[in-house]
């Protein structure tokens, strides 16, 4: 989330360009999902620019935003890390992948059964779904996504996990105070780190096939 429709659109377009570069750099199919993460994040920001311009509410853009933010990322991130991980790390990554799959299934259920709405609050947008046991969902979501990044086995992926973990705490603090939404800055930084990761892959002959 950015602080305005224009900011979301500009940042989202920039992240999408980074994503295209990341995907173009990788050669191994198993690395494509993680390399494509910036594409997903960029699309997410662009969709939210539509939410801003529509004044919030419960329209298709709001639902699309929630689908990406909740079930899609919950399962995409851990499985992308699992696929791209070195063989020695794959066994332990099954745990966050399984947590992500279960979390995504539960979140999808509530998205089907309930209506998600967006509320514009100054320079932030609040999304309301009315999830039961929210702390448990948050914990499971973080274990699946940030947890997978932290134990992914690749040093750059681990750095990405640490940046996302610390950045999420800071962004959440600003967002809860309804001061300024800075999630798009975190998405942009994460995308740059994925770009660095793909650059390292391109320079490593062992990572070009598979």
Image (cartoon, rainbow, N blue to C red):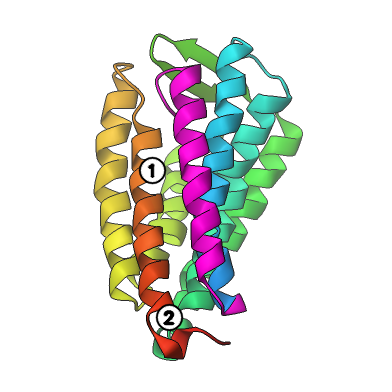
Image quadrant where one finds the N terminus: top left
Horizontal and vertical percent position of residue 66: 60, 35
> Is 198 drawn above or below residue 128 in the view shown?
below
Please tell me which residue is depicted at 40% across the width and 9% down the height of the picture. Answer: 122
The rendered magenta stretch, by its main secondary structure, is classed as helix
**Residue 130 at least partly seen:** no
> Which residue is label 2 attached to?
92
With respect to residue 158, does 124 lie above or below?
A: above
Q: Is residue 97 left or right of residue 50?
A: left
**Magenta segment:** 1-29
SS assignment at label 1: helix
Rendered image quadrant of residue 30: bottom right
Q: Position of residue 59 (x, y in %)?
A: 71, 20
Image quarter of residue 27:
bottom right
Image quarter (top left, top right, bottom left or bottom right) of the C terminus: bottom right
| Residue in view at x 47 percent, y 50 percent | 18
Give the x, y percent position of residue 126. Answer: 48, 21
Give the residue displayed 50% in from the left and 35% down from the top.
12
* Disc on the earlier residue, 2 or 1: 2
Nearer the camera: disc 2 or disc 1: 1
Look at the picture and state if 66 lies above or below 26: above
Spatial separation of the CA atoms under disc 2 and disc 1: 28 Å
Q: Is residue 167 inside the magenta stretch?
A: no
The label on residue 188 is: 1
Closer to the camera in the image, 141 or 25: 25
Residue 82 shown left or right of residue 115 in the figure: left
């Amino acid at each position: 989330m950015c602080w305005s429709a224009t900011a979301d659109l500009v940042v989202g377009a920039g992240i999408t360009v980074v994503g295209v570069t990341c995907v173009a750099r990788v050669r191994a199919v198993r690395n494509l999902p993680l390399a494509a993460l910036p594409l997903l994040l960029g699309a997410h920001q662009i969709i939210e620019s539509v939410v801003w311009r529509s004044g919030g509410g419960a329209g298709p853009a709001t639902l699309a935003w929630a689908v990406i933010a909740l079930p899609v990322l919950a399962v995409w991130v851990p499985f992308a890390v699992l696929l791209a991980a070195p063989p020695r790390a794959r066994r332990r990554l099954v745990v966050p992948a399984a947590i992500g799959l279960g979390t995504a299934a539960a979140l999808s259920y509530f998205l089907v059964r309930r209506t998600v709405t967006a509320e514009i609050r100054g320079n932030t947008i609040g999304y309301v779904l009315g999830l039961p046991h929210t702390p448990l969902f948050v914990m499971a979501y973080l274990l699946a996504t940030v947890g997978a990044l932290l134990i992914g086995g690749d040093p750059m992926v681990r750095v990405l996990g640490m940046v996302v973990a610390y950045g999420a705490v800071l962004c959440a603090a600003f967002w809860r105070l309804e001061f300024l939404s800075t999630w798009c800055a975190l998405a942009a930084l994460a995308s740059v780190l994925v770009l660095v990761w793909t650059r390292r892959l391109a320079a490593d002959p062992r990572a070009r096939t598979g």
